[in-house]
Amino acid sequence: MTTAAHSRQKAPVVRISAEAVPKQAFADLLNGVRLQALWTRLAFHDVRQWFRRSVLGPFWLTLSMGTMVATLGIVFSSLFQQDLAKTLPYIATGIIFWGLLTGCINEGATVFISAEAFIRNVPTPLNLHFYRMMARNVMIWGFNMAIYVVILIYFELLPGWNMLLFIPGFLLFLINVAWISLAAGVLSTRYRDIPQIIANLIQVVFFLTPIFWSPANLPTRPAFVTLNSFYHLIEIVRAPLLSVAPPWMSCVLCVGMAVAGLGFTAYLYRRAHSRIAYWV
Amino acid sequence: MAHISIENLTVEFAIFGANSRSLKNQLLSQATGGRVMSGIRDVVTVRAIDGLNLEINDGDRVGLIGHNGSGKTTLLRVIAGIYKPSGGALTIEGRVGALLDPTSGMDAESTGIQNIYLRGYMLGMSRREIASKLDEIADFAELGDFIELPMRTYSAGMFARLAFAVSTAAQKDILLIDEGIGAGDAGFRKKAQRRIESLFDRTPIVILASHSESLISEFCSRRVLMQHGLLQSAS
């Protein structure tokens, strides 16, 4: 019997002291990772719950994103007089990853605020909520990727070796999205204007970033493209999926951003994690 | 052996009102040199627990009493690891289970069975542990076939019985209870009483925060009175 085995276990000893609180920030992050089974289950539950009792279920995500991709694809391929077989995969991958990026950041901003009741009443590592949010968004992304597969098949695009670069690219993409979202979550819990600021910024950046338009159509590359870190983030996952090696410049920038960003977020989390339960 | 040792524990937190929580105010106060908007950076700090010392041993049934806002729930949250101390330290031996809100984790759109899992996870139970107790919990909650239906179809009583049944199924060394637990009509209350007794019997340390004198005198062997974050008396 499991309960009997449990009670025979040696009881864990935990010491919580005021001085050691900042040091526990990283333990908290790691303990959250260890609960991977729990947050994936909860994330799965979230996705299923949204579409409960609907016939298509989570495939509504795929369908609505698919409609948007198709519409934008048709409009922009005729606007720029380009081949649909070239425009559609470009727009599809761009929008799918933009969706993942902004979904995580937007929801990241409110990840602690919306889990208030949980945080105050259930003793779990704080960032369980953060991992749950990330897992949920990656699951949604999975449903959206079906669009990409359909496009590949429909236009009979042959996958190339460069596609393998997608794997490290996606990891780098996720690391960057993770630190931005966690930083947004911590700052938003303290300053309640930040979620609004983020939501507004994201809308603007959507138009500044080459997602449904390509910088290849422009005679010169404007600064808001070359200096746009979101462009580089999208590029390291989009290019491999279009069987092109991502530009070196983007890879270097994204690695640099990941290192600097993780450092910044670690500093922030270390300072703030013990206060979040009071702030929510 | 379960044991809790609290040394000189202090918990303080800042209350951000409508004033100081927004970014604008912080930026403005920088820009105006804090002169025009003076006062907005004065964050009210509440000292919820002030230099508390307490030893709780294996077998103790502690009743936490005191007025609203005296720091009872805050103390439970600190022991649960939710609130971090701003001064002092505590050492906890044993696995802590918290029944601060007997329904947290539950979801109205999910079925009874799913809710047993959802609530169980929040109590720190593993999937296997929940599965092994599933039948017993469902039986106890007396939901019959409703257990397969979404929880929004339940009456308030059914919902309370289910939450109670899961919450009392977990096996921990230290149990923290806020405002008592219990559910349902007269017939169920007797059953619930026996279940709480058996839960208390197998749990080495129970800390119960309550306003109910009868509950405390019935279940608790020690009483700790708190007032304004200070330990007033402990027996």
Image (tube, coloured by chain):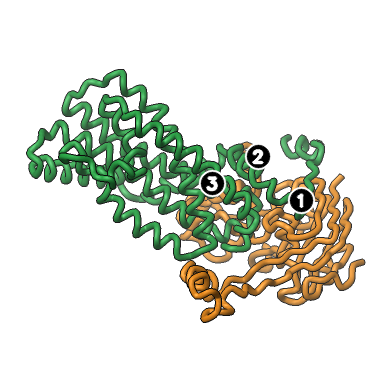
Most foreground residue, B163 or A200: A200
CA gap, disc 1 to disc 2? 28 Å
> Which is more foreground, mark 2 or mark 3?
3
Q: Chain of mark 2?
A: B
> Which is more foreground, mark 1 or mark 3?
3
Quarter of the figure with residue B74: bottom right
Secondary structure beneath label 2: helix
Q: Which chain is green?
A: A
Q: Where residue A161 appears, x then y in whole percent?
A: 31, 18
**Residue at mark 3:** A264
Tell which residue pokes out farthest to the right in this image: B235
Please state which amino acid type lies under the numbered disc 3: Phe
CA gap, disc 1 to disc 3? 25 Å
Q: Residue at x 73, y 70 (%)?
A: B47
Q: How many marks?
A: 3
Q: Is residue B219 above or below residue A255?
A: below
Tell which residue pokes out farthest to the top in this image: A161
Please state which amino acid type lies under the numbered disc 2: Glu
Q: Which chain is orange?
A: B
> Which is more foreground, mark 1 or mark 2?
1
Quarter of the image that includes the N terminus of chain A: top right
Q: Chain of mark 3?
A: A
Query: Is residue A197 toward the left or the right of residue A158 in the image?
Result: right
**Residue at mark 1:** A16
| Precedes in sequence: disc 1 or disc 3 | 1
Quarter of the figure with residue B180: bottom right
Q: Where residue B105 appears, x then y in whole percent?
A: 56, 54
CA gap, disc 2 to disc 3? 39 Å
Circle on res. B129: 2
Secondary structure beneath label 3: helix
Quarter of the image that includes the C terminus of chain A: bottom right
